[in-house]
Image (tube, coloured by chain):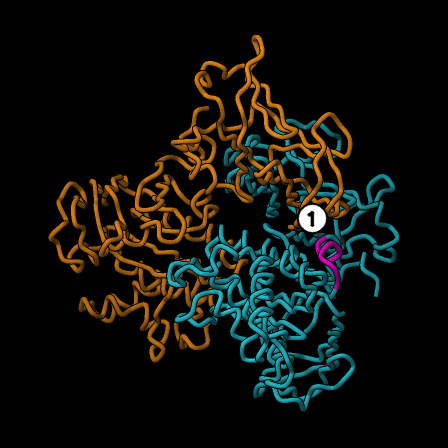
Amino acid sequence: MKLVLKELTKQFGDLVAVDNLNLDIEDGEIVSLLGPSGCGKTTTLNMISGFERPNHGKVYFNGKCANDIPPRERNVGMVFQEYAIFTTMNAYKNIAFGLRVRKVQKKQIEREVLEIAESLNLRDALYRNINKLNLSELQRIALARTLSTKPSLMLLDEPLSNLDAALRERTRVELKHFHDRWGITMIYVTHDQIEAISLANRIAVMKEGKLQQYDNAQTIYREPANVFIAQFIGSPPSNIIRGEIMRRNGNTIFHRGNMSIDISNFKALTGERVRDSKLVIGIRPEHIAVSKTKNTKTAQAAEVYAVEPLGIETILDLRIDDTIIRALIETEYSAKVGERMYFDVAVDEMNIFDAETERNLRVKG
Amino acid sequence: MAHIEIRSIKKAFGKVQALDRIGFSVRDKEFFCLVGPTNAGKTTTLRIIAGLEKQDEGDVLFDDVLMNDVHPNERDVAMLFQNLALYPNKTGFENIATPLRIKGFTDKEVHKRVHEVAEILHISHLLERMPGTYSGGERQRVALGRTIIRRPKVYLFDEPLSNLDAILRVEMRSELKRLQRDLGQTMVYVTHDQVEAISMSDRIAVLHKGKIQQIGLPGEIFNKPNNMFTAGFFGSPPMSFLKCSVEKTGDQTLLTANKINLDVTSFSKQLSGYRSVRVGIRPQHIKVEKDGTGGEFKVVAIEHLGSKSVLTFEAGKDILLAVVPAAWGIKSNDSVRVSIDPSKIYIFDEETNRVIV
């Protein structure tokens, strides 16, 4: 089903929870609403399901305004953080429930249940004691049960949040497979940027009720529309460095204290900005190369300020004067706190933001 | 000041053996992590240390003093849980002050201690507000304040970061670590998150099905796993395990599976007597190229994570995962060349799951 949100606004007292939200969601797409707690993502979901009424704006289902359709007639399936299943029935009966209510023939029920179970890797769980299943299996049963009611749209509100780290990763992959198999339109609410990037066709990043950017994962990751997004996406997120422009030997240089980066290549973007005007740059930690010796002309010295090993990779905090730059490096090349190191920036992958508006100069409009 | 000694603890709930001869010692001022999946026995262990649960067998000692029959109140430990309960009708100040009020501290002393703790946790601005107005992270910090104000011998933390959102969790990780160092107190920290364990701990005990799998420094646990469980638990995405047969041709020893040949002649001694083994390969140690000498594999699935992409391949009945720098261009069903560096693999016994090499 094609879903359109137009100028959607919801206020709770003085608080504008959702502020003039416009979104187009194509049939079969999985769109993620991503943002920190309190950004309005769940309120948006509630307006789509009909549990909340917008103060202004409209929700369109396949071109038809749904504002006055009561929730139960919207044919929307919902899955929440807490799995909702019948704990007195086994998985098979849970999934079959929606079909039995609609008086589908027994043979057909069996076929559909098996097909849905297969798509969520639940075949082995169908007849087992439901109290012996793990949280991932229970949540997948909830998904299967919701799908069996044949909704035209599925709304998922942080469905993986209650799972432990390892299960969450595995279930994420299964959820993606599930969506690919059934091609049902899905809205997926999460605060976890990795889930959004890995699952969604498009991501709507929200903050304080306002839409910040709506695009595919690659674009949002590589060209975040503003400083907020650059710092919200990525683990660890982008380095954001606030500094000034200066000229050196005809080149345009960004600097903050003794740290400097040649940004002559971005001339078309920095355009009018003259000496001493303020600028913000964003560099992803994986775009910083580190070495113990100065082996390129552009490499700059820094002191290792903190080391956070993550296993195969390590986060290094490098300090130059009062600037801390985070680099993500392979643990084998790790360093000790206080040691002197040299770093280089992959300039082409950098983003440049206006110091006033904090908008990305690489993103038009 | 406290070191903790756990000796051969057993605990059953009905027929379920929750803990099966657990033993470890936590050094004074150490950040010690109990890590494992859900139902591994982590929380039960923590509750036994606190005295909230009584073990069936075995001993708990604090500074060489037997604690088995010491009431939780008198053990001088402080616990922090995943689900924090703040008093909703009390200000942040009073919430933090509660443990001191109970112990009958003077107003002046309470005032001083609360402000000290608030300073450490950067929550001075929250003291006059009610918990209802806090965000998730603010709540967590106030609860933390209430836990640490008493300066007990030992801190016991049970998944304190699980309910926080992703960004806050990463932030609190380094903050908690710093806090523990500043307080200079012994800490036992329970988590299911391998990244938390690796990044925060001085030492780690890996728990699975009520048994200790391995105890060691984070680097040891990650790089020298004892068995397949530990190897598969640490690292994200997890290590892949391939069933390979051991083949000897002349001087050479090869491990082979569907389109994969690994020259492991240098390990031929350890592999003598084995006909087949499980080979563990970290996804980061697999080289993926468009062309090249590696075996040709079809990409079954690709998952983009921003800075990197995870590729899934099928090798016979086994799944092989590879992590590559962001490869937005690769699609499912593309053919690529895959090669594995034999010096980076782990070899496990199929029967015992224990590491051979």
Left-right relation of A292 to B55: right
B37, B220: nearer the viewer: B37
How far from the left and from the top, in percent, is residue A153?
Answer: 66, 73
> What residue is shown at x 60% (from left), y 79% (from top)?
A46
Magenta region, mostly helix, strand or loop? Answer: helix
Image quadrant where residue A362 sits: bottom right
Asked if B75 appears above or below A331 in the picture, the reply is: below
> What residue is shown at x 34% (from left), y 36% (from top)?
B215
Asked if B307 appears above or below B164 in the picture, the reply is: above
- Chain drawn cyan, letter? A
B127 within the magenta span: no
The residue segment tinted magenta is A215-221
Disc 1 designates what residue?
Answer: A283
How far from the left and from the top, in percent, is residue B157?
Answer: 34, 55
How far from the left and from the top, in percent, is residue B175?
Answer: 45, 53
Tag 1 subunit: A
How far from the left and from the top, in percent, is residue A309?
Answer: 50, 40
Asked if A261 appears above or below A301 in the picture, the reply is: below
Left-right relation of B237 to A254: left
